[in-house]
Image: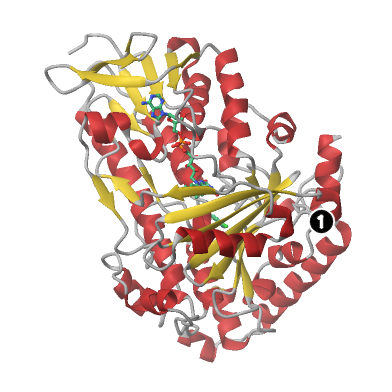
Amino acid sequence: MSAKNPDRVVIVGGGTAGWMTASYLKAAFGDRLSVTLVESGKIGTIGVGEATFSDIRHFFEFLDLKEEDWMPACNATYKLAVRFEDWRGPGHHFYHPFEQLRSAGGFPLTDWWLRNGPSERFDKDCFVMASLCDNGRSPRRLDGSLLDQDFAEGAGDPAGLTMSEHQGKTQFPYAYHFEAALLAEYLAGYSIDRGVRRIVDEVRHVRLDERGWIDHVVTKEHGQIHGDLFVDCTGFRGVLLNQALDVPFVSYQDTLPNDSAVALQVPLDTEKAGLRPCTTATAQKAGWIWTIPLIGRIGTGYVYAKDYCEQEEAERTLREFAGPGAAEVEANHIRMRIGRSEQSWKNNCVAVGLSSGFVEPLESTGIFFIHHAIEQLVKHFPAADWHPRLRERYNSAVANVMDGVREFLVVHYKGAARDDTRYWKDTKTRAMPDALAERIERWQVQLPDSENVFPYYHGLPPYSYMCVLLGTGGIPLRPSSALNLSDETAARKEFAAIRDKAKFLVDTLPSQYEYLAELRA
Ligand SMILES: Cc1cc2nc3c(=O)[nH]c(=O)nc-3n(C[C@H](O)[C@H](O)[C@H](O)COP(=O)(O)OP(=O)(O)OC[C@H]3O[C@@H](n4cnc5c(N)ncnc54)[C@H](O)[C@@H]3O)c2cc1C
Ligand SMILES: N[C@@H](Cc1c[nH]c2cc(Cl)ccc12)C(=O)O
């Protein structure tokens, strides 16, 4: 056992996970930590991964990066919500926004809405963001100020807290869309400027010592690369953790059958088309299509289950959906490994990114998983004794985040009212994660709250569950019985205030295109 604290990190993989890890570790430990990143020049990155959680702002803040520093370089746009289309039935849409749910008389507005909502749109009645999305508004004014002082940036949040310690405080009003490859490139420049050594080469062998810990990796042209801690960012291959250290992979496929995707990058005249400030997930016969508006192009892709749809049919469906602008664009077909490694940290090897785990991008969680993993790695960084408790706590936090998100995604399918194809019919009878069936039973009598959703931190607050259940429409819900005896004056006032604020914001905010054109000028 080494007598010194580990201070040499070797990262294998140069995708979003690799460069997010390298840049964050450098920002955390500076020159006290040596970081080497090895990435193959021949094995491509996954090439997708463009929408995020709002928490990602803490990543950029930690690196001391402002929006004007990185957004133009990554063709980035704002994301106020996910817009779900055709999940309840043809022509229906609803939003899952970045906006705290208000209460009246001690009960969430959604309870009051179920009892006697002002309209058939719970999202427009309970959240201002739904109106901003419907009208293509920017979350910032042309002077750069945020849309509303209610969303004060970081108000009262001490700097440096991890995401899990932020949840439940001010819900920041937006996330981002960006070109994954451009972000990786930007972070590579940031990292190399701060002393990260980049080696473009393929790792051919992983050499273990007598304890089964990684002693070094052997590359094709740069020989042996030694280190103390090895970070596996090799994507779905899991070259270090799953292959060399033989850590099993726990599949989620029995509950989430979507295992394939086909993606297109469709050129876009942004000025002519405008910029919808949200990700769109449009339900299809055997899955759903994502639409992510970027500067200059639309990122779009069909996530589907190969047991219900051949890849040729999936590509045809996507091309028809994307329209003539996609005619000359090459399709990127992807097989997705759905699930997580049994443990993401074994001995002196930590997996971050697809090598650690992945679920379909329905709620844009891949980069959230990376960010969470890196924060937790810093929080549990080993000392000379490599205390196993640190690894155990890390593995538990990472496993819970992925298991919790998996459960949240299953709720989308269990709740989807549409049942027009074998795929959608099967969603209702498919296996569920343990305890979810009981949770769904309870939600039909008492809406989701902090006591009856997945019990460990997984990045999603109870109101996210409310949005999905109310939006998909397939699970019968009812308001708290206490409202039968409650005065609804306060709720009526709250609904009126939301309606008035939404109208004011739509009337006074610039379009997203107008704001970003200024930012890029
Ligand atoms: C269809 C799809 C849509 C997605 N959409 C989103 C989204 O909207 N939002 C989101 O947050 N996430 C999304 N994701 C997830 C996101 O793409 C990934 O989390 C992110 O790109 C991280 O990928 P990675 O760096 O782990 O792996 P990769 O991008 O696959 O990178 C792997 C790296 O390892 C290197 N490598 C592999 N083997 C070796 C070797 N032997 N030697 C040296 N180098 C090696 C490769 O060269 C590459 O650099 C999506 C994923 C898929 C599949
Ligand atoms: N911590 C997450 C939770 C969240 C709250 N609203 C949304 C909406 C969507 Cl589309 C994803 C995630 C979330 C965050 O603040 O990003």
Q: Position of residue 139 (x, y in %)?
A: 75, 52
Residue 124 placement (x, y as % from top left): 69, 73
Residue located beneath label 1 in the image: 273
Q: Is residue 198 visible?
A: yes
Which residue is located at x 37 percent, y 68 percent?
A: 452
Residue occupying the point 79% across, 57% down: 137
Residue 153 at x, y = what percent?
A: 67, 43
The residue sitting at the bottom extreme is 484
In percent of the image, x 83 and y 63: which residue is there? Answer: 506
Q: Tell me: residue 422, above or below residue 326.
A: below
Residue 105 in sight here: no
Q: Label 1 is placed on what type of residue?
A: Ala
Query: On the rendered image, what quadrant is the C terminus found in?
Result: top right
Q: Nearer the viewer, residue 176 or 391?
A: 176
Determine whether, in the image, residue 12 is placed left or right of residue 516.
left
The extreme left residue here reads 210
Quadrant of the snapshot with the N terminus:
top left
Classify 379 as above or below 286. Answer: above
Is 508 left or right of 449, judged from the image as shown?
Answer: right
Disc 1 crowd, CA 10 A, few/some/many (<14, 14-19, 20+): few
Residue closest to the eye, 74 or 346: 74
